[in-house]
Image (cartoon, helix red, strand yellow):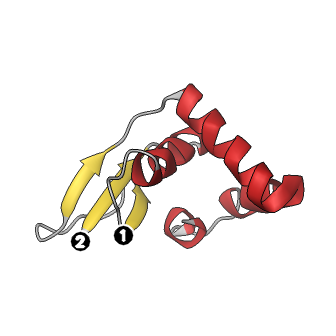
């Protein structure tokens, strides 16, 4: 399984989403750097690229509206340790 690992901030998460969809990396999950890893998974570490994050935000607003983006921000701020995978 291909998993993208991102930093613990929203722009890094959106960068990982960009890498998965627009760069066609086809990840099955997005997780934070500090989460446990399996040697069976293909792990790809993703940094933070603000221009990629902005493109994803614009795409979300176009498809889901501003309220959809706000819902994602609220979910990201939750205390759930699996929030990246859940939102993805």
Q: Position of residue 77 (x, y in %)?
A: 71, 56
Residue that carries the numbered disc 2 in the rendered image: 1
Q: Is residue 8 visible?
A: no
Give residue 78's quadrant in the image: bottom right
Looking at this view, name the residue that lies furthest to the left: 39
Quadrant that contains the N terminus: bottom left
Instruction: Report which quarter residue 53 is drawn in.
Output: top right
SS category of the residue bearing label 2: loop
Check if mark 2's residue and mark 1's residue have beta carbons within 8 Å.
yes
The image quarter containing residue 54 is top right
Is any part of residue 12 visible from this angle? Answer: yes
> Which residue sits at x=60%, y=67%?
87
> Where residue 42 appears, x then y in whole percent?
18, 61
Could you say which is closer to the camera, residue 23 or residue 73? 23
Mark closer to the chain start, 2 or 1 = 2
Q: Is residue 71 above or below residue 48?
A: below
For disc 1, the neighbor class at 10 Å (few under 14, some 14 to 19, many from 20) is few
Q: Position of residue 85 (x, y in %)?
A: 49, 68
Q: Going by the image, does 40 lie left or right of 15?
A: left
Q: Tell me the residue at 11%/66% (across/down).
A: 39
Left or right side of 41 for 59: right
Which residue is at the front of the view, 3 or 51?
51
**Disc on res. 77:** none
Residue at horizontal 12%, vertical 71%? 40
């Amino acid at each position: 399984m291909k998993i993208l690992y991102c930093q613990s901030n929203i722009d890094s998460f959106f960068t990982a989403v960009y890498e998965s969809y627009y760069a066609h990396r086809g990840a099955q999950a997005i997780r934070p750097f500090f989460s446990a890893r399996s040697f069976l998974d293909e792990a790809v570490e993703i940094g933070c690229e603000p221009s990629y994050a902005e493109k994803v935000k614009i795409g979300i607003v176009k498809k889901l509206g501003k309220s959809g983006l706000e819902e994602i921000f609220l979910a990201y701020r939750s205390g759930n340790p699996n929030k990246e995978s859940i939102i993805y």
